[in-house]
Amino acid sequence: MDFALDARTEELRQRLLEFMDSHIYPAEPVAERQLAEADDPWSPPPVLEDLKAEARRRGLWNFFLPGEHGAGLTNLQYAPLAEITGRSPRLAPPALNCAAPDTGNMEVLAMFGNERQQKEWLEPLLRGEIRSAFAMTEPDVASSDATNIGTRIVRDGDQYVINGRKWYISGAMNPNCKILIVMGKTDPSAATHRQQSMVLVPRDTPGVNIRRGMHVFGYTDGDHGGHAEIEFTDVRVPAENLIAEEGSGFAIAQARLGPGRIHHCMRLIGMAERALELMCRRTLARTTFGRPIAEHGVVQDWIAEARVKIEQLRLLVLKTAWLMDTVGNQGAHTEIQAIKIATPRTVEWIIDKAIQAHGGGGVSQDFPLAELWAAARTLRLADGPDEVHKRSLARRELKQYLPPKGA
Amino acid sequence: MDFALDARTEELRQRLLEFMDSHIYPAEPVAERQLAEADDPWSPPPVLEDLKAEARRRGLWNFFLPGEHGAGLTNLQYAPLAEITGRSPRLAPPALNCAAPDTGNMEVLAMFGNERQQKEWLEPLLRGEIRSAFAMTEPDVASSDATNIGTRIVRDGDQYVINGRKWYISGAMNPNCKILIVMGKTDPSAATHRQQSMVLVPRDTPGVNIRRGMHVFGYTDGDHGGHAEIEFTDVRVPAENLIAEEGSGFAIAQARLGPGRIHHCMRLIGMAERALELMCRRTLARTTFGRPIAEHGVVQDWIAEARVKIEQLRLLVLKTAWLMDTVGNQGAHTEIQAIKIATPRTVEWIIDKAIQAHGGGGVSQDFPLAELWAAARTLRLADGPDEVHKRSLARRELKQYLPPKGA
Amino acid sequence: MDFALDARTEELRQRLLEFMDSHIYPAEPVAERQLAEADDPWSPPPVLEDLKAEARRRGLWNFFLPGEHGAGLTNLQYAPLAEITGRSPRLAPPALNCAAPDTGNMEVLAMFGNERQQKEWLEPLLRGEIRSAFAMTEPDVASSDATNIGTRIVRDGDQYVINGRKWYISGAMNPNCKILIVMGKTDPSAATHRQQSMVLVPRDTPGVNIRRGMHVFGYTDGDHGGHAEIEFTDVRVPAENLIAEEGSGFAIAQARLGPGRIHHCMRLIGMAERALELMCRRTLARTTFGRPIAEHGVVQDWIAEARVKIEQLRLLVLKTAWLMDTVGNQGAHTEIQAIKIATPRTVEWIIDKAIQAHGGGGVSQDFPLAELWAAARTLRLADGPDEVHKRSLARRELKQYLPPKGA
Amino acid sequence: MDFALDARTEELRQRLLEFMDSHIYPAEPVAERQLAEADDPWSPPPVLEDLKAEARRRGLWNFFLPGEHGAGLTNLQYAPLAEITGRSPRLAPPALNCAAPDTGNMEVLAMFGNERQQKEWLEPLLRGEIRSAFAMTEPDVASSDATNIGTRIVRDGDQYVINGRKWYISGAMNPNCKILIVMGKTDPSAATHRQQSMVLVPRDTPGVNIRRGMHVFGYTDGDHGGHAEIEFTDVRVPAENLIAEEGSGFAIAQARLGPGRIHHCMRLIGMAERALELMCRRTLARTTFGRPIAEHGVVQDWIAEARVKIEQLRLLVLKTAWLMDTVGNQGAHTEIQAIKIATPRTVEWIIDKAIQAHGGGGVSQDFPLAELWAAARTLRLADGPDEVHKRSLARRELKQYLPPKGA
């Protein structure tokens, strides 16, 4: 057992930290200004393209993707880097071409896409030229139970015809979003987990009706392309747009979610570090009742708690990454659930305290805290609410004490 | 001791509940639509004027104000009515002319305003013709310690000259907001709690620069007139605009805050009841893993907790109202602090669970939950953060065990 | 609505407070010493008989029992008195003949006992001459589901024959405990809630084997007669020892539990007040890092929280008592469950903080805190664990949103 | 970074797990019986000597001590082994000669003792022939601030004379406890952290008056030699019994506490695992409302939470051990505090849930849970209460944002 980072990770960390200082943090107010003055509320700020160019030039690119297509890092190597990008979550991840939902979509295409699909969609995504979206969640059912999905994908000759309604499809309102991966049922009579399939749907296909942007605690996340509600009405795509095979949708979704969840958790830890830093700085700078706020016992309690919680979370995320690298996503199932349960709520708690320490400023647009909070809190229900993960984890824990079947 | 409502309160409750059903709830989607189509983001939806007219016609008006100027209710009688309005907090309180910050401002004018001030500002406020704002919080200091306030109010002949910067001045961007009550220091050399004064500043006075609307977790609360940042630069008002006397600002603020805090708490309880109802209805209507969500044990736990918490909060708010009626705001000091500490955080917890039970819908604009949540959470730091109230309450608790001074 | 105590309650409160100061608190160290030197670990300290005599002389007696047999107080009148006795829970309740389980047993006999049963058992209990026990909980099943009960009570001619095993039968090891009320199944084939009956079993009946005293976090509660494990082997009692009728056991248990639960909650509030007082006194008296512990912000936070929580709990307990008086135990069902859920855990929290503020002393025998804590914590699972109450309360909450049956 | 155990640790783990199964768990009921029948309440059960002989024979001995005197394991290697012993904390640690307070005392003697002291006391301790105690905490002051210590150690010729009162001196009532390490002030006029010294005091020295055993939530921990209150009245020991030099007491205490705290945390994790296992087994075996308790959602929530919390704690403890091995105790300061804060309270929570799942059995002597709970809860205040550690940790966190001194 060894808790030291390897040399390559350490070297990339230093380079990334330097890039954060020299480019990302200075770009935050620039982006804020550009967004305030923008005509299109669903496009990223122009400064982002500069950041992408610079990051790519520096070799800070596609860290998230193991194997030949990406930077060749393991999950364990990527984790400390992803954490750093979480300190500026609106700019740093897309600047490094490491932003959801593209990351998950690239993974799907890299793992399950055929050559044509990779050429047409994966390659421009890897170059950061286009964006993509992942259309799974539906407004009409409790999507935390994936078997509830109602969208139909029906084979008609050499085409698939798609009908259904999706929402919270992140990034889909970005004009640069060119391709949607759509999950739906091809065979409702099949076994529960073989009913679903995924197809590639270009965003400009007729019948794809992007109706509105969903809000998240008042935020539209417009600079990330929002969270679209989309109606699919008799949408037709070539049959060759099917990913893998019919009935493989559930398995692909599972494969996609593991890395997606850990990436979120890595970044959340960076968000927590940012919030803690802001809390320390603010409470040292302001005074009540004759003392800096930082000297009040309750505030010190928050600061200590934040540190104690962050250290534990980070280690669990790192160990999970290591397990994914060494025994595979399936072998890391419990740990992936554990970090998905523990991280958003804990980081939410830390940000909440940082907000409280900032008074009115904490809930305002003058600090990133309220927006970070909304992101952390939403992750308690996105990708499966905590309660579903806990139920599943508990059942696995209990199973080891059950008599073997047939006994 | 008797926990039954008196006949007048019970009768008003029935009439108010009927009004909620017949007018307020049906107006919610109307208001939503009007706001989406409005040109001016800082004005209330037109339907509100209809609601006001109807409420006034029905005698559901100015409940909040004890004594001759208002409806003649005690705090204890008002509490169950205010709770009901909290179920639709964007429409019902203003419809009944019982919305903050006007309520507090009317109280100040009724208690401390002279005849001219009452005629000019209190009367149109009581008739619901104009709106008002209360300018106390400042961006540059920790305003939870009122002695930190930096705005200066300097006597110059028969005028006062005001310089300073305020923020989170709720309602001040509403074009119908005509008058600001501004708190500032007239005499920095006086005893700590005699330095501050309050003056009436018409919103259109030269030098009053309304700079922008502050956000609250992504919301602008535009239909309530937002939360303005205001710069006061050499703003001149007649000396007769002083409320009460120089040095009385801190005392007036304290007098204003007691009722203000309890009104917030009353409405918060209504918000909690609304959230609980939504949680029950939603979890009965949706299914995961073969059962309605409402049958999952963890969700039942939330529902039970919500009920158990609401019952306790309501009683403490009612007792506090009774104390204010019987021994005065000063005698209810501990209880006012106690409800200010307990209510926002508890209601926040309840709304959070209702959000979680709604999945993505919970954080969206399709349900009132996310916005209710932002309101509840913000009240943990508005009007003094919980921590300041707890510190003060604890000191009073400890004092009874100290040896008497001079002993 | 009125939150003032009535004159009779206020007068009794004053007399009781005086008795606490003059007799109960001074008896605490005496009892401690007597117990340390006692031969029989299962008997109360001799000083208790003096306290009983004095309390009876002062008319501080049988407060708990409404109606002719008792002091004629309502539940609402009894509540503030019971709270005071909770400040010294080992001595004050038995001194006033208001200690569990006798109170519940007297209620059962007063409500359901026939004349002979009342004469033989109720009268000496009311005079405080004997003690009693209530034998319901069983070690072999989850007794929180009362239908699980396994003890059999079988009619055999003019006798009942009892077989089964019970545990945590409080008070049963006290040599002065003369009578057991035993719950068991008379007809396992009847409808679920008509299977059980209750019979009176004199403690010295052959076949009643008191095996051992169960512990509660290391405490034996010997001075209360412990918590016995009892084996009933072919125990025979006359058929006339049946309480009420066959099949009425479940209903009687329910009737008994309502008052029992609220009495526990009343006393718990007194325990919380005692703990808070001890916390204040201790933290004012000791110094760390150059300041009295009471000046550290975290400790003030605990003190404020304790006060805020206690005020809410007390009001809910009082309202519950009022409901029991005005609409009956059945009408107060939700509130009885609510206080049973809220009170033990909250008081546990408060005592825990008082312990922490005392350092090593807090867990020791030198302060009552650790023992109070064990009592509070155990009440989270006694008389039905919190989780069962929450489940039941939630189902009732949800029911109002269900379509009416047959609709 | 690598999360796999090394081969030696893995091999020792297997051997230790086997020993637990073959000897420790079977000895638990034996010990229980022996203790119930014992004459001397302050001696360990005889079976412990058998276990020690067997453990030593198997080479499962003195794992805790790095370096030549012990088994030569690093902290990181010891941690997973200590965790396993925590599953049976009354028997396994002493069976392996790895029980507090001997471990800390052996460390002190190994690091700071001179040759004579090592020969006389360390060697028999290492062989498990005698026990020892560490006398630091005092009843009359808040010992969490070590500068408060009042015991005096005064040089008088070639002797030291000790006067003072100590309590919670664990193990000191065990007749086999032969030596006390006593902390006191040799020079109250020295700098704050140079006032204290430590001396070795044989337990049978005249003037050492062992007054009583302190309780811990009703437990006396008699089989561990209890927690003595000791009065030192003119106790004289040779000057050569001084450990290291005068004024080094505070530094030695700090050196001793680091390993002591991590050992506690390691074992606490084993306690949590034991509690979780018991919770799973019990809830699978019992039924309420027609289903095994384990199928109720709230119970599954507890189980999942327990697993999620344990995984995080374990990693933080392991990383702390690794830091102690690689950068020293001083470099691991923050992490040692973090585990001291996080572990007891979290394990307390887990055990509490296991207790709740056991109903009455949970608080009884029939399961180890209540006693495990008392141990975990007490560690929230032993060796410095959580609050003191949090205050210190927060100050270090804040320091990095302060301008450098002199700037």
Image (cartoon, coloured by chain):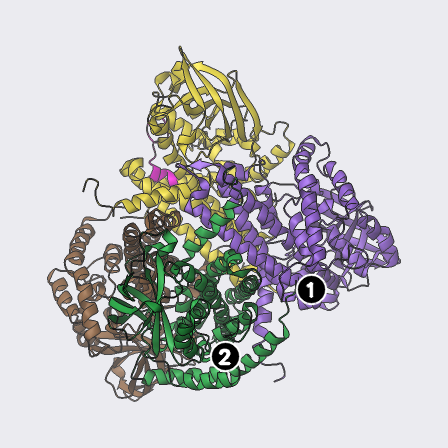
Chain colours: A yellow, B purple, C green, D brown
Q: Position of residue B58 (x, y in %)?
A: 77, 45
Pick the quarter of the image with the C terminus of chain B.
bottom right
Closer-to-camera residue (A386/C204): C204
Pick the quarter of the image with the N terminus of chain B.
bottom right
Q: Position of residue D213 (x, y in %)?
A: 31, 78
Q: Is the residue under label 2 in contact with that under label 1 (CB below 8 Å)?
A: no
Residue farthest top in this picture: A157
Q: Position of residue C146 (x, y in %)?
A: 36, 56
Closer-to-camera residue (B234/A190): A190
Describe the element under mark 1 as helix, strand or loop.
Answer: helix
Q: Position of residue A199 (x, y in %)?
A: 41, 21
Closer-to-camera residue (D302/B172): D302
User: Which residue does the numbered mark 1 point to in the structure image?
Assistant: B324
Q: Is residue A238 left or right of residue C160?
A: right
Residue C406 belongs to the span the image colors magenta? no
Which circle, 1 or 2, is nearer the viewer?
Answer: 2
Please name the residue shown 27% across and 44% down the image: A399
Residue farthest front in this picture: C157
User: Which residue does the numbered mark 2 point to in the structure image?
Assistant: C61
The magenta-colored residue range is: A66-79
Residue B348 seen in the figure: yes
Tell me which amino acid carries mark 1. Met
Q: What is the spatial separation of the Cα atoms under label 1 and label 2, in whole angstroms? A: 36 Å
